[in-house]
Amino acid sequence: MWRSAYARLAVLTALAATAAYVIAELVPFADPIPAAITAAIATRATFHHAAKETVFQSLGALLGAGIALGIVWLIGTGPLVILLLVLLCFALARLLVLNSPQESPLVAGSMAVTVILVVGTHLTSELAFQRFIGIVIGALCALVASALATPTRDTRLLRRDSEALQHDLSTLLSDVATGLRAAPDADVARNWRDAAVELRNRSIGLDARLEDLSSHRKWNPRIDPEDLASLSTSLEANGVMSARVLSITSDLLASSGGNAAMHIPQAARSPLADLIAMAADNISADDPATSVGRTQAHEAVRIADQTAQIALIGGIVSNINRINEASSEGSDAWGEDHHTAT
């Protein structure tokens, strides 16, 4: 169960909230309830998100306490205080440079929760101080829990998943090369295409994770800018390869249909399969070449005797050549360390 990110986050969040409550009870002038609530809402599956959240929670508590005391002194307590403070949180979230404009509503909501916790009921300077200290304790517990949730650097995890995607792309192309020699039917070709769609979606997901890391790297000292640059090149290569593999499997699915003009000639299957197998080996190679299998490519295209077949096979050959180029580009991103991250 501990291998599940969701279960690990649930356990660590519960422990963080409990620890914050206990510590706040032991520390003089600290309120345990805001401490536990802050730890629960600030613990994240990634350290950089937790670091950003704790800053907003602490900032919201500090500003909320000071401003709330001023408002209460002027107009007293009541619903109007909550209205003004929440509006103020939205104004601060837009004015502060700690977040992007797209994140402002979420940041404002998070700060508003903290401000309301600080204000509570029967607000006094002593109570505001106790609640602020409790929130700081909860924020620190959330940071520790979030660091334990991702003990491995985020860039290393992303690199490992990138290499796993390359391995799966190589495996799929190997399966396609083996099956192509036996003239696959539409069901087999459709399974290849569906697998390629899943791999392409994984590539898009990795790109989203990299974008998230890049936009929040200032919150996490463990993120190395050089690693981000290498990851960007590697994931861009993965995106090209996954898109080209999807194109190849889509072409093979089209060739397995009822249109005889689109069928790949039997004599062209073997050289085309050899070409795909070489590309599969090239993806997983430590030092991939930019161009392999030119003889097989010429042979496969030469055998095609109809315009549709020439276009189909030529497109597959073009995609394979681009896969070889991308695999070389992705390998160069890591240099001598390629395929060493685990």
Image: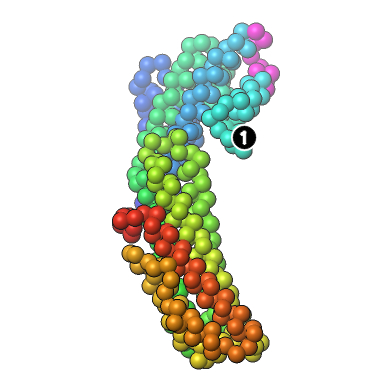
Quarter-of-image position of residue 3: bottom left
Quarter-of-image position of residue 280: bottom left
Residue under the point 61% across and 25% down: 95
Mark 1 — residue? 101
Tell me, what colour scheme is on the image? Answer: rainbow
Seen from the viewer's position, the closer of residues 95 and 308 is 308
Q: Position of residue 20 (x, y in %)?
A: 40, 29
Q: How many marks?
A: 1
- Badge 1: how crowded within 10 Å, few (<14), some, or many (20+)? few
Q: Amino acid at mark 1?
A: Pro
Residue under the point 37% across and 39% down: 222
Q: Residue furthest top?
A: 74
Seen from the viewer's position, the closer of residues 95 and 137 is 95
| In magenta stretch: residue 318 | no
Q: Which contiguous range is marked in magenta?
A: 74-83
Q: Report whether residue 33 is seen.
A: no
Q: Position of residue 245 (x, y in %)?
A: 51, 70
Residue under the point 46% across and 63% down: 326
Residue under the point 36% across and 45% down: 153
Task: Name the quadrant of the C terminus.
Answer: bottom left
Q: Report whether residue 126 is seen.
A: yes
Q: Position of residue 186 (x, y in %)?
A: 58, 83
Q: Using the image, determine if residue 294 lies above or below residue 209.
A: below
Task: Name the quadrant of the N terminus.
Answer: bottom left
Q: Position of residue 73 (x, y in %)?
A: 61, 8
Find numbered disc 1 in the image and state the secondary structure of the residue it sits on. helix
| In magenta stretch: residue 77 | yes
Q: Residue furthest bottom?
A: 267
Q: Using the image, determine if residue 284 lies above or below residue 316.
A: above
Is most of the magenta stretch helix, strand or loop?
Answer: helix
